[in-house]
Image (cartoon, rainbow, N blue to C red):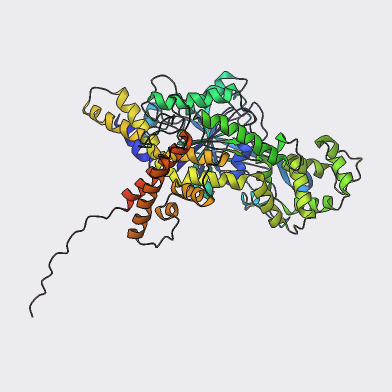
Amino acid sequence: MRAQLEECVRRLDEPLRVALAGQLKAGKSTLLNALVGQDIAPTDATECTRLVTWYRNGPSPRVTAHATDGARADVVVRRGRGAEGLPGAHGLTFDLSALRWNPGPSRAAEHASNPGRSGEAGHHTNSSLSRAVDFRANPGWPRESGHHPNPGVGRDVEHYTTPGVSGDVEHRPNPGAGREVEHLAVEWPSEELAQTTIIDTPGISSLSRDVSARTSHLLAPGGNSVELPNADAVVYLLRRLDNSDVEFLERIGAASDAHGSGSGSGYSGAHETGSGAGYSGASGNSSPLGVIGVVSRADEIGAGRIDALNSARDVASRFATELERTGLCQSVIPVAGLLAFAAATLRQREYQAFEALAGVPTDTLAAALLSADRFARPDLPLPLPPELRAHLTARFGLFGIRLAVTLIRLGVRDSATLAAELTRRSGLDELRTVLDVQFAQRAEELKAHSALTALARILVANPGTEADALLPRVRTLLADVHGFTELRLLGHLRAEELPFSPADLAELHRLIGGAGVATHRRLGVPAHTEVATQRELALAAVQKWRTRSRHPLADQFMANACLTAARSAEGLLDILREPPTTPFARITLPRN
């Protein structure tokens, strides 16, 4: 019990943990690469994506396989070659066929030294692990995975052996090893991973029940489990919205509620305390705190047309209405993950290929882009070899090719500008903004909720001690989830508008943290504004929005939105209250 409590404290000092979840082939590894801006997770999505993989910041690329008995092994990582010396479209491959296991500590000993790390890939050091890296073509790798206008930068690495990376992994048995890989650990030098640990999970609709169960156990452990929460927040990828998606999100919420969070997701009444975490009609299920949906592979929704993202936004809006109505998700964002990742790692040779295609007559190119197979046919009169055309299709998709060519025809003249435009139009920038507002700026709140949830589980599982007196207080703290009420309202405001003036809508958006959670950002004033002035603005906001919530023509949604804004302003008053003054001690000067 002491070790578990120490883990609760230690978790508060770690980076925020965000899990990527969704059905098989939803595009989780591609989105991970796009968010990190590097090619670190294999994207050749097959049934071999069967392992939970933890991605953390580290001084150098490091890949480790962890067995159920605590043993560890180095993983051979290979990079495929693409057309004309470009890196392969599917990035890295991880070979688990011949792992050489180094006996690790027993599971009990590992828990004693690293409490609460069940299924987690922490920063483990093992001097016996080999670090044989073959930088045959570019000793500076992995820098090649970034954006390089210079075609000479970023050659392939044939293969290397390192302690720890994964994404889409081919898992083949190791004869005679007698061990099963439980999870993979990836350490990679990355600013994004320094702030956030990303957990890539197997598809929930895998053909193997055991594989799907790994994700369920990670995010929604059943029974009377006292395992600490593995993730603080979830990004759930959707290609469509069916029963398996809804049921999985409900299991996550039910697991949270079963362990005493008490944070009901329904916001069906005018809760002036702001303790509800949802808005309409979610009868009693506790939605996971910090869940956003992503309509992944959004370019495929519009069949790769130039306006595919517009169709995807309509689909995302329908998904958002359903998921937010049931309290299962706070926002749904359409993202063309393949295009976002390709834009983040655009090479100069690829830009030159798009320039050449831009000179092809519009009708000729449109006919060639009717399908991926047709575009790669060798008999087409196009200025690119078939192998390069196939490479562009695998990297950018037909939607990305059409968009890139169109942008060049409209005046884009360099690879950096093209990469920025493709990123913006992929939806990745919008997703980053939502992740920043809902996850990064509320990281301490999310981690505190995970720690309190873990503490509640530990107290429930160990009754009859003096710590029993803490449980009511812990449940009270877990019930105060106004921050997540704000998140759900932000999600609603993306999909529907309240009958307020633009100025009032902007104020509402600011007050509930849509522009940032700092007090001056919520109040819309410069950071150096005097505290007394900020208190006056916060008090005026409380009065304004409480009055509006009582308007006779306000429906339930409008009243709840106004009450949420008022509750947020009250929180600002609490933060901005005058600190107690301590009189200065009388100073007696020494006599000469």
Viewer-side residue, 131 vs 358:
358
Quarter holding residue 450:
top left
Query: Which residue lies at the image location 34% right of the left edge and 39% below the top edge?
Result: 9
190 vs 547, left or right, is right
Viewer-side residue, 216 vs 481:
481
Quadrant of the rendering where the N terminus is positioned: top left
Q: Is residue 494 above or below residue 323?
A: below
| Residue 180 at least partly seen | no
| Residue 448: image location, x then y, percent | 37, 39
View extreme (left): residue: 591
| Residue 356: image location, x then y, percent | 83, 52
533 vs 140, left or right, is left
| Residue 243 at least partly seen | yes
Quadrant of the rendering where the C terminus is positioned: bottom left
| Residue 472: image location, x then y, percent | 27, 29
| Residue 412: image location, x then y, percent | 75, 57
Query: Which residue lies at the image location 62% right of the left edge and 25% below the top edge?
Result: 172
